[in-house]
Image: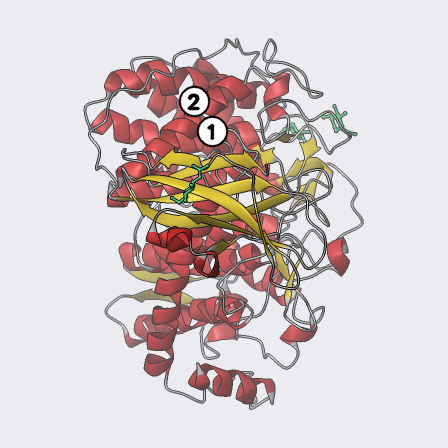
């Protein structure tokens, strides 16, 4: 902690070489150890943070149906108490990859619930349309109970179906290689098929970008659409089906993807006049979510280590150096706080945790690819990026046996760690990740506990530790057609009805996180507690009762909630009590409530009560 602060302060005091390098006040090795420790701790906070926001048993998910992900538990200023197709898919792609690595059965149950919920969501008619011609699949968000959101919104958003297909395919591959081919074919494929048909039909129409502001063509959207079509075709074949529309459209999406390249960076929104520079973390997110560990530093698929993406990383991150006070005095070549785009005015325009983490993640993924390729090719396109972090860099190809390669990769790693250190610096001691941090004070801003912020921490950590996602076939889908053509393939859509998951072997949880949710109208100074027959609930001693949280209390939903870890199978009695400002205790009316902590492979459970 202390060494990090000293480091930051010295850099902020502009201890800068003529070439623009900031001298670290502590040796890199020592710095890395402190960062390692923080990351390991924060990563488990991030995993809990994600799980808390998933219905129906997550600690902060009261009101959300099974398998639906809340964007944030925040209900006011801003109200993110909805489930977005994009955010949910990105979150579950991260959880599927965690599951594949850890084989934790409680994660698998969450994944199955998510997929079952998506099968149903696809059939919900909404203001974007319905399933009959696919149009309804691009509805950006739904109510937390899975019904349509009917208010005005930036719709359609055409990245959602592509990202959901990618998340489901990742799990489908696991099913296939672990003896559950029929679940892959009969449960996962019908949902994926609808999403792929959607992408193939509508990729060449404008829609709202991932920030829900611009109705045009978005790099992120096109990049993830290309990926989905490519891996969708391979997944179809692996379950004995085919996706001719994927095959006919994928090359054209790749062709169109090239259009975003300006020659020196990616213009993230085209086919629309935004009046902006086009410099946008949209592009960095597009690259990390189409990273393929088996691909090389390929420009046409914008791989993280490609000359184009490295050049773009520099241009995009540089665009935030002058617009945020927290970046004052940080010299080029040292990491900065990164927001969505420099012209952003949402909440006055601030850095976002997930954008800063994605800047780190791109570089870790690039480092992996470079090591795998075994050399670094610095071209005129990427030269400025390399010179920023290693001033004597020059164009050429440097093999892994050269000292230049060692110096460049070491500079790259240090630079990437710098972005994580920025996030560390502006993360409160609770470890909670909001959506943004204030551009001047660095304090958390906007929605608390943003699920996507936590998911981006998980994927950053995985990339940093070389825990790799599966290949999606980029290496054999990078040939750009000679001529780009406007095109579309009309799809056929049908409801996915099978959600009968096999009985996967699983580990029974010995303890369960039980969340007590109670609706209790209170006035200032009053607090609600839960007290009960077990020690964790104070053994009926009101002085040892568990205080509940009113952080999400509203007039219409006067929620008090709290989570207690209890042994599976425990049978208990409990009651809610109210403590008045003067300490007086008011009990609920009789009888005592009773509850049996479930014995299952699930690690969380939730109770919904109303004060009596
Ligand atoms: C459709 O594709 C053509 C050919 O790539 C491209 O010129 C055009 O901008 C695309 N339009 C949209 C909205 O995607
Ligand atoms: C955004 O553009 C699409 C055309 O691709 C159009 O159908 C839709 O109505 C537009 N949405 C809004 C809110 O203007
Ligand atoms: C509730 O439980 C307490 C503690 O065991 C007991 O003293 C009390 O009589 C119970 N109340 C009712 C209504 O059963």
Mark 1 residue crowding within 10 angstroms, few (<14) / some (14–19) / many (20+): many
Name the residue rendered at 26%, 66% in the picture: 400
- Whether residues under marks 2 and 1 lie with C-beta atoms below 8 angstroms apart, the answer is yes
Task: Look at discs 2 and 1 and give the one toward the viewer.
Answer: 1
Q: Quadrant of the C terminus?
A: top right
**For residue 349, what is the image quadrant?**
bottom right
Name the residue rendered at 46%, 41% in the picture: 58
Name the residue rendered at 35%, 73% in the picture: 410
- Horizontal side of 140 relative to 309 (left or right) equals right
Name the residue rendered at 67%, 19% in the picture: 126
Q: Quadrant of the N terminus?
A: bottom left
Tell me, for residue 502, which label it has, or none. Answer: none
x, y (%) of residue 292? Answer: 37, 44
In the image, residue 245 sits, relative to residue 35, either above or below, namely: above
Using the rendered image of the protein, determine whether residue 230 is visible from the camera's viewpoint.
no
- Horizontal side of 595 relative to 205 (left or right) equals left
Secondary structure beneath disc 2? Answer: helix
Task: Say which residue label 2 marks.
Answer: 116
x, y (%) of residue 416? Answer: 44, 66
Instruction: Name the residue nearer the viewer: 168 or 63.
Output: 63
- Counting residues from the start of the chain, the first of labels 2 and 1 encountered is 1
Secondary structure beneath disc 1? Answer: loop
- Horizontal side of 159 relative to 459 (left or right) equals right
Ligand 3 shown in quarter: top left
**For residue 25, what is the image quadrant?**
bottom left
Task: Say which residue label 1 marks.
Answer: 66
């Amino acid at each position: 902690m202390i060494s990090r602060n000293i480091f930051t302060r010295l850099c902020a005091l502009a201890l800068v070489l003529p070439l623009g390098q900031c001298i670290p006040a502590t040796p890199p090795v020592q710095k890395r150890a402190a960062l390692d420790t923080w990351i390991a701790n924060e990563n488990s906070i991030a995993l809990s943070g994600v799980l808390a926001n998933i219905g129906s048993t997550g600690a902060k998910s009261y009101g959300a149906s099974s398998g639906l992900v809340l964007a944030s538990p925040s209900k006011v200023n801003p109200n993110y108490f909805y489930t977005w197709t994009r955010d949910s898919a990105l979150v579950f792609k991260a959880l599927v990859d965690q599951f594949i690595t850890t084989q934790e059965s409680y994660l698998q149950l969450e994944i199955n619930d998510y997929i079952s919920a998506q099968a149903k969501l696809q059939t919900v008619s909404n203001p974007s349309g319905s399933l009959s011609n696919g149009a309804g699949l691009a509805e950006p968000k739904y109510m937390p109970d899975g019904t349509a959101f009917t208010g005005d919104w930036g719709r359609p958003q055409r990245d959602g179906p592509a990202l959901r297909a990618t998340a489901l395919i990742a799990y489908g591959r696991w099913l296939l290689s672990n003896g559950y081919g029929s679940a892959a074919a009969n449960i996962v494929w019908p949902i994926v098929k609808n999403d792929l048909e959607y992408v193939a039909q509508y990729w060449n129409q404008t829609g709202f970008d991932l920030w829900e502001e611009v109705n045009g063509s978005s790099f992120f959207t096109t990049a993830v659409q290309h990926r989905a079509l490519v891996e969708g075709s391979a997944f179809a074949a692996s379950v004995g089906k085919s996706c001719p529309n994927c095959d006919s459209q994928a090359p054209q999406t790749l062709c169109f993807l090239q259009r975003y390249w300006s020659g020196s960076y990616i213009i993230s929104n085209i086919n629309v006049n935004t009046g902006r520079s086009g410099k946008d973390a949209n592009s960095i997110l597009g690259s990390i979510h189409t990273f393929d560990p088996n691909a090389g530093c390929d420009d046409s698929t914008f791989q993280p280590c490609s000359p184009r993406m490295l050049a773009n990383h520099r241009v995009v991150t540089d665009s935030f150096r002058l617009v945020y006070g927290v970046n004052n005095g940080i010299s080029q070549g040292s990491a900065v706080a990164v927001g969505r785009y420099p012209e952003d005015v949402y909440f006055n325009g601030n850095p976002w945790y997930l954008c800063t983490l994605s800047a780190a993640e791109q570089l870790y993924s690039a480092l992996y690819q470079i090591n795998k390729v075994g050399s670094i090719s610095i071209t005129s396109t990427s030269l400025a990026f390399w010179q920023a972090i290693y001033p004597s860099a020059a164009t050429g190809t440097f093999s892994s046996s050269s000292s230049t390669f060692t110096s460049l990769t070491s500079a790259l790693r240090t630079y990437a760690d710098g972005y994580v250190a920025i996030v560390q610096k502006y993360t409160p001691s609770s470890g909670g990740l909001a959506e943004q941090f204030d551009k001047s004070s660095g304090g958390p801003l906007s929605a608390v506990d943003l699920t996507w912020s936590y998911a981006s921490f998980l994927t950053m950590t995985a990339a940093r530790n070389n825990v790799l996602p599966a290949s999606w076939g980029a290496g054999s889908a990078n040939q750009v057609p000679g001529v780009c053509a406007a095109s579309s393939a009309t799809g056929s859509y049908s409801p996915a009805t099978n959600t009968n998951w096999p009985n996967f072997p699983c580990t029974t949880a010995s303890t369960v996180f039980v969340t007590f949710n109670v609706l209790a109208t209170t006035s200032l100074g009053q607090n609600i507690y839960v007290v009960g027959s077990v020690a964790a609930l104070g053994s009926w001693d009101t002085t040892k009762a568990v205080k509940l949280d009113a952080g999400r209390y509203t007039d219409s939903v006067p929620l008090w909630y709290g989570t207690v870890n209890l042994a599976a199978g425990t049978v208990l009695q409990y009651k809610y009590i109210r403590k008045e400002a003067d300490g007086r205790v008011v009990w609920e009316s009789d009888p005592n409530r009773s509850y049996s902590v479930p014995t299952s492979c699930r690690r969380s459970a939730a109770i919904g009560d109303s004060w009596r």
